[in-house]
Image (tube, rainbow, N blue to C red):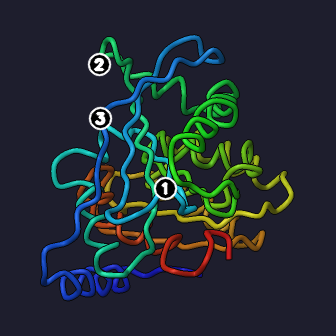
Amino acid sequence: MYTLRWQSLFLQVLLFLGCSAVASEGSLGDNQRISSSILGYDLQYRVYRPAGISAQQSLPTLYVTDGQWYLEPGGMKAVLDRSISAGIIDPVIVVFLDSRNPDRPTENRRTKQFMCNTDFADFFANELIPTISNEQPVSSSRDHRVILGLSFGGLNSACFGLMLSRYFAGIAMQSPASGDHVDVVRELYEQSETLPLKIFLSVGTKNDNTKAVRRFRRLLASKGYELSFIEVSEGHDWRNWGPLLDDVLVAYFSGNGGVAD
């Protein structure tokens, strides 16, 4: 399936019309620290919980790398509140994983963590996902888990599709980078069997990794992946990524009973 830009605009109109009343605000927890024996250092994350949920529910989970950027003012929390309040998407737990050293925020570890790093994948599978499962009312099924990232974080989502398809049914990539890295991942997908993944892929047409992402999209389509693809007339920045957050959410959580359904 291919998502066109006009569909994104239509969704934004629906969100506006559906939220004439004040949106019910979900809660965004404080930073939580997790000590990883696999990575050998601490990380931190914040959890978004929709309003009005109970401890007995079994909600889908969206994991977001570079979570600190997605949570900047006017960012993803507001989109989640509006989308859930308007009934555009079902309630979802969102884990915003910070890519920075919690003791030295100027140190960003993303270029090491996001390059198909097997230790980072093992951290998710054996430490982060079990922690969230113990702390939050989330589903234990891989059919209700999605990983989202931008730029190198988008590349990480592609890597997790190959490395952690047992844990994630959905991989969402906003402008995966760089072009050379995307070409390497494309070749790995070409060599792999078609995996049970639902994929969201977007790219800008100005100063973005457009050609490499288009080649990746063609390869994924040829292998029969369920694919939502969007191109926008923006660059490798938040004017591209921010307006597509509602599209990402709708692609996976729009009341269809499961990410992979």
**Dot 3 amino acid type:** Asp
Q: Which residue is mark 1?
A: 55
- Which quadrant does the C terminus fall into? bottom right
Describe residue 174's horizontal placement relative to residue 166 as left or right: left
Of callouts 3 and 1, the N-terminal one: 3
Q: Residue at x 55, y 51 (%)?
A: 147
Element type at mark 1: loop
Q: Position of residue 91 (x, y in %)?
A: 43, 68
Describe residue 3's horizontal placement relative to residue 164 as left or right: left
Q: Residue at x 27, y 65 (%)?
A: 81
Describe residue 189's horizontal placement relative to residue 258 as left or right: right
**Dot 1 amino acid type:** Ala
Q: Position of residue 131 (x, y in %)?
A: 58, 35
Nearer the observer: mark 1 or 2; the answer is 1
- Which quadrant does the N terminus fall into? bottom right
**Dot 2 amino acid type:** Pro
* Residue 105, numbered circle: 2
Q: Residue at x 38, y 18 (%)?
A: 101
* Residue 168, numbered circle: none
Describe residue 108's horizontal placement relative to residue 189 as left or right: left
Element type at mark 2: strand
Q: Which residue is mark 3?
A: 30
Q: Position of residue 2 (x, y in %)?
A: 54, 80
* Alpha carbons under labels 1 and 2: distance apart: 33 Å
